[in-house]
Image: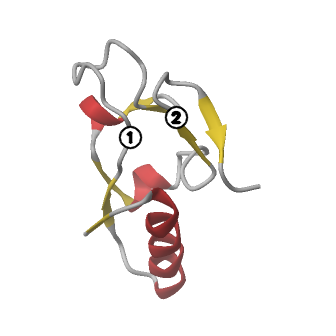
Amino acid sequence: LACGPEVMLWFTYKACQELGVDCQLSLERYMKCGAGVCGCCVMDDSRVCKDGPVFDSSQLSKLTEFGVSKRDECGRLVKFRP
């Protein structure tokens, strides 16, 4: 189980994959409403505030935005890694 900046969590996830270890990561996203209505914390089709914030290895493997982009304060998708 780990929490922290998403880039750090992405590398933690990759290390766990290489070692064959299941992991659970607590993702950090802006959560304005906390009820899944505003969409600011959305990652692919998951709402971090309602479906998480803790995601396991099988859930993380399906998230294409994980470790690649984030949402800014207004909910806009911002890439931080090519």
Q: 19 or 80: nearer the eye?
A: 80
Amino acid of disc 2? Arg
- Residue drawn at x 61%, y 31% is 77
Amino acid of disc 1? Arg
CB-based contact (under 8 Å), mark 2 and mark 1: yes
**Quarter placement of the C terminus:** bottom right
| Snapshot quadrant of residue 51 | top left
Taking the view exactly as shown, the residue that stands out farthest to the right is 82
| Snapshot quadrant of residue 31 | top left
Q: CA distance from mark 2 to mark 1?
A: 7 Å
On screen, residue 19 versus residue 31, left or right, reads right
Q: 61 or 12: nearer the eye?
A: 12
Q: Position of residue 28 (x, y in %)?
A: 35, 48
Residue at image mark 1:
29
Q: How is the protein colored in the picture?
A: secondary structure
Taking the view exactly as shown, the residue that stands out farthest to the bottom is 19
On screen, residue 24 versus residue 6, left or right, reads left
**Quarter placement of the N terminus:** bottom left
Q: Position of residue 69 (x, y in %)?
A: 61, 45
On screen, residue 59 versus residue 50, left or right, reads right
Q: Earlier in the sequence, mark 2 or mark 1?
A: 1
Residue at image mark 2:
71
